[in-house]
Image (spheres, rainbow, N blue to C red):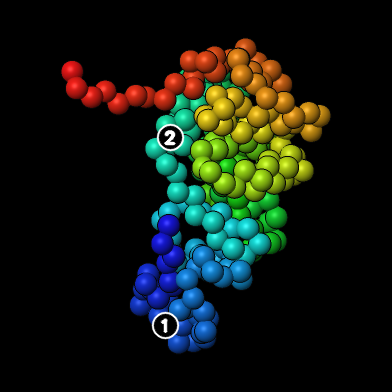
Amino acid sequence: MEAIAANEIATPQSEARSKSGVWQDKREIPLEERSDLTISELEKLSITDPYELINGRIIFKMANPQHSHFQGEIHTELGIYLRQNPIGALFPDLSLRLFPDDEQNLRRPDLAFYLNENAPTSDEPATKAPDLAIEVFTSDSGFLALLDKADLYLSKGGKVVWIVIPAKSSVLIWTAAEKRWEYQTLTCPELLPGWSLDLKKFFVWPKTTTGK
């Protein structure tokens, strides 16, 4: 994604802030090159693209078609189950402040499931890790960073992390007790009793037909 300079999306209000010194010496630096960004600063810019903030560095989450497809499919599968079994809430691209006092860190899992007793209830970013965090991996790089996120979710109270990998037609299941690959049937009895997903059918990427 092309870097965005703060002055390219400045409003009259942000220009006034720059004159008062808030943006001084920073407004010409592309956001992606800075390492001192804060949540409050980014909120003032009203950025519409989803992003994460990792130690003051912004990471834009630009989903490709395959990523969007599988994120939507698993959202649908879980949504059907939860309508019949209202035991919790499912949130796509939920902002997480797992370090509530840290202005330089914000995470955003592709899907976050909370049991009812743990679900966030305010309009502010959630401060508790999801009971189940789901990430879809479809890029050529960044897998180690995704593993770091999974470890963070578990260290902050999450119970299960799924890393969905269409290229391998599999899901990496990560809990405090184990890491394992699943290729056949995805289940989560500790959080979603009775739910299952046939991965052989799930990992079917739509094919474009040509000719006839």
Whether residue 79 is visible here, answered yes or no, is no
Task: Tell me where residue 125 appears, x and y as whole percent.
Answer: 58, 51
Q: Indicate the quadrant where residue 4 lies.
A: bottom left
Q: Indicate the quadrant where residue 178 lies.
A: top right
Question: Is residue 132 depicted above or below 85 in this figure?
Answer: below
Question: Is residue 85 depicted above or below 32 in this figure?
Answer: above
Q: Determine which residue is flagged by label 1.
A: 16
Farthest residue in the right direction? 177
Is 23 situated left or right of 171 in this image? left
Task: Tell me where residue 134 appears, x and y as whole percent.
Answer: 59, 34
- Report, in whole angstroms, how far the alpha carbon at label 2 lies from the one at label 1: 42 Å
Is 148 situated left or right of 8 in this image? right
Check residue 66 in the rendering and tell me which mark sits there, or answer none.
2
In-front residue for pair 79/139:
139
Question: Is residue 16 depicted above or below 102 in this figure?
Answer: below
The amino acid beneath tag 2 is Gln
